[in-house]
Amino acid sequence: MRVLGIETSCDETAAAVVSDGRDVLSNVVHQQLADHQPFAGVVPEVAARAHLDQVGRVVQAALDQSGGGWDGIDAVAATAGPGLIGGVLVGVMTGKALAAARGLPFIAVNHLEAHALTARLTDDVQFPYLLLLVSGGHCQLLEVEGVGRYRRLGTTIDDAVGEAFDKTAKMLGLGYPGGPAVEAAAKGGDAGRFELPRPLKGRDGCDFSFSGLKTRVRMTIEGLPPGPMQDRDIADLCASFQVAVADVLAERTGRAIDMFRAAHPRGRTLVVAGGVAANQAIRTRLQALAADRGLGFAVPAPALCTDNGAMVAWAGVERFRLGLTDGLDFRPRPRWPLDPDAPKAIGAGVKA
Ligand code: KG4
Ligand code: ZN
């Protein structure tokens, strides 16, 4: 069985063909870097127009590179939320139109579920597992019990972790996209030079907070001698920021491991997913935590952590084999939590 997956919820126009045998037959990603660079961030309308320009070419390339074209495609999946609504509409309409024209089932995929299930494509991880989902819009700890079955243990009470990377990069003049720029600048930096806070570390539960860290980065920059920032200052500040983030993620995830173990004694694995999981320092830190706590560890290759079509196609495979398809009247959902029953974290600005 093969599924075509389409991803357009943020600034990557992506499509892929994936089989139920866990083969990624094609995975085409168009990054809209040049479109957004002048604004040092993603501009929703610019993104939507770029998706419209690119989606036909990207889908055709994914079909061509899969080696089979439309032959053997059993369903069409598209990200239907959460995300920037203009882009989501482009992907959903494309997916529905192709499904209707080819007489195939359509599958509406939750972007967060696509991140959440990727480790089953790459590493065949079995349910239940503990998931740390770290992306541009989210920072959550979830028990993953099955397809469509999530229980949220913790979430951010203010900024998402990728957002903190992106804002730090912007303040340091490193541009967009911020996460990879901060990681590159941190190489060779002295992580001990600047003392930055570890928000909520040591507190009950496993919620996150990053806005105080961001503020301290700004104050640290303002405290440096006037004039252009030196490369050494940038490297040291990026390294100090990255280690503070890794510390908080590891401590909060450690608490979530206790909760997960109590609820799922048979659970064996810690999974990390989402764009920030592409960060090597964070991967290494969480891998050490899992080893220390006697859990297996799975994190997709960096190209499958950041947004891509293969994760959407795979979520489509998982849903399709359970008979979970959607009608052509499915309405895109700009907000779409994985665990609708989760209590809101204390504080404002909780995403999706
Ligand atoms: O999952 P993703 O591609 O899109 C969303 O669903 O949000 O995540 C994008 C986020 C951005 O904030 C980006 O700066 C961050 O992931 N990111 C990274 C790295 N690569 C991407 N953050 C830290 N280190 C990286 N290497
Ligand atoms: Zn994403």
Image (cartoon, rainbow, N blue to C red):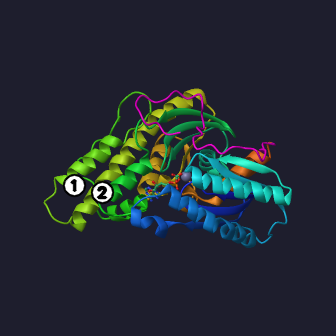
Q: Can residue 30 be seen in this view?
A: yes
Query: Badge 1 local density, few (<14 within 10 Å), some, or many (20+)?
Result: some
**Residue 55 placement, left or right of 161:** right
Q: In which quarter of the image is residue 289?
A: top left
Residue at image point 41% right, 33% down: 348
In the image, 196 versus 202, the foreground residue is 196
Q: Nearer the viewer, residue 4 or 301?
A: 4
Relative depth, front residue between 68 and 245: 68
Classify mark 1: helix, strand or loop: helix
- Is residue 194 in view? no
Q: Which of 301 and 63 is in front in this view?
A: 63
Identify the disc placed on residue 221.
1
> Where does the image place residue 262, in percent across and percent down from the top left?
55, 27
- In the image, residue 29 sits, relative to residue 119, either above or below, namely below
Say what amino acid the circle numbered 1 marks. Ile
Quarter of the picture containing the N terminus is bottom right
> Along the horizontal axis of the image, is 221 left or right of 115?
left
Q: What label sits on residue 171 in the rendered view?
A: 2
Task: Read off the magenta span.
Answer: 323-352
Q: Which of marks 1 and 2 is nearer the N terminus?
A: 2
Q: Is residue 338 magenta?
A: yes
